[in-house]
Image: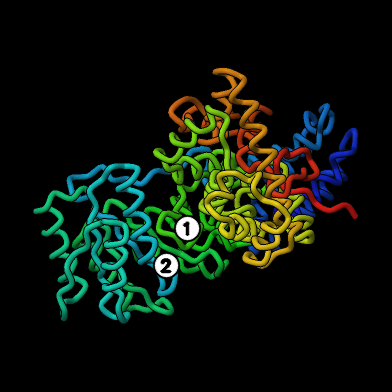
Amino acid sequence: MFEALNERLTGVFDRITGRGALSEKDVAEAMREVRVALLEADVALPVVKEFIAFATERATGEEVIRSVKPADQVVKIVYDGLIEMLGGEEPVPLNTNANPPAVVLMAGLQGSGKTTTSAKLALRLTKFDRKKVMMASLDTRRPAAMEQLAQLGKQIEVATLPIVAGESAVQITRRALQSAKLQGFDVLILDTAGRITLDEGLMNEVAEVADIAKPVETLLVADSLTGQDAVRTAKAFHERLPLTGLVLTRADGDGRGGAMLSMRAVTGLPIKYLGAGEKVDALDVFDARRVAGRILGQGDIVALVEKAAQDLDQAKAEKMARKLAKGQFDLDDLAGQLQQMKRMGGLQGIMGMLPGVAKMKAQMADSGVDDRMILRQEAIISSMTKAERKKPDLLNASRKKRIAAGAGVEVQDVNRVLKQHRQMADMVKQMARGGPKKMQQMAAMLGGLGGGGGGPDLNRLKALGGGKMAEPSADELKAIQDRLAGLGGGQLPGGLPGLPGLPKK
């Protein structure tokens, strides 16, 4: 996400960081480059002009030019400007405070991801807000649209309105309202029909449905990869339909970010959610501070730990904690850590959320350090017998050759995994001998950050830096980095322990 924009902006700030003081000429030059970077990211021209005017006015002030660290001040001003552009400090929550059922209407063009997003939102409301949710498809035109929502409902264990052939969207709406009310549902999500392009029939149908359902939230689902087309779609819908918020899909594949950066400023509507993957749980609450931090290479440490908390199997974590307390860590445990990394978005996804490592991504890619490494290591461990995974000392030369052949790798790759395991096992033994304090660090390594019970204290995490650009403390960051321990057994530039070493050139 934002790879191209991050790279350009990081380059701009790197060039001014080494200067002791900044002149107005220096600031003007930097702002010109920021302007080009935003335009290349497909941000709407009026939004860019307003942003540059805001940033230039503040960056040329006396307190910046004569400050001890003027470059840092300029970065902070750009950060504040990005937050303002994206909608302000605090996320805008979904409003479900209404006489049940609270209706959420999903609108958008065909192919924008409305049906999948409806299911993702239903799962989120069920899982985190403890709401009783029903979904209903009003898409009578797209083949199998209703069946698709029904299948998603079964997958996430959320009720869907039974399909009755031949009904119109208006008839389905009335039946859904009655059914949800009689069965005591808290929230009713209506998935409306889309079109390839905007047309009068689509607008009339959605407007009629909205008039009957009287939704508390009307969300426009837009594909962020379409850039300024998404912005134009949002404007057109908002002129005919009283939208209350936006959901941007495919945000994880959007390297430019133009739609996201333009949407709020052009429409005045808050972005409420980001679809960041194909899985049904890949829907994130939009937080302008965290997005701005990622654009500027500050990472998103809270999102990383939240992912760890969501994917953490409490029973497995407690079982592993008991093993670690005895100083035990076998190759099955290492395989479990690799699987956890995959669930959290893989190596690239995790690196993207750690502060200060964005610059290493290209170097990692050139050196073959990517998610395929995790798959290779899993294959190596899977090629071992149960006895070998429990007791790696059994692995002599002939066994290593057999494992390498079974996994389709070289013997040196097997040795690398064994070295990685040995380093982690030694660390576990050291922790087990260190008493309660070391045990607390062990729990942090398992559950992200935080206290007992194997789970992270998210309230404490969200307070880190007060949502500002301040990074977490060294101990807190190390706990997460240790969680990635040892892939390849080396150390990346920048002092991140436990990450794979890059070959020296």
Task: Identify the element where label 1 is drawn.
Answer: strand
Q: Nearer the viewer, residue 114 or 419?
A: 419
Q: Nearer the viewer, residue 391 or 424?
A: 391
Question: With 244 as the anchor, is 100 left or right in this view?
Answer: left
Q: Which mark is residue 113?
A: 2
Q: Are marks 1 and 2 in contact (CB under 8 Å)?
A: yes
Crowd band around label 2 with a 10 angstrom C-alpha radius: few (<14), some (14–19), many (20+): many
Residue 476, given in percent of the width and then of the height, sits at: 62, 29
Specify the amino acid type for callout 2: Gly
Picture residue at 65% right of the left edge, 26% below the top: 430
Q: Which mark is residue 55?
A: none
Task: Identify the element where label 2 is drawn.
Answer: loop
Specify the amino acid type for callout 1: Gly
Picture residue at 90% right of the left edge, 37% below the top: 19
Residue for badge 1:
275
Residue 457, given in percent of the width and then of the height, sits at: 47, 29
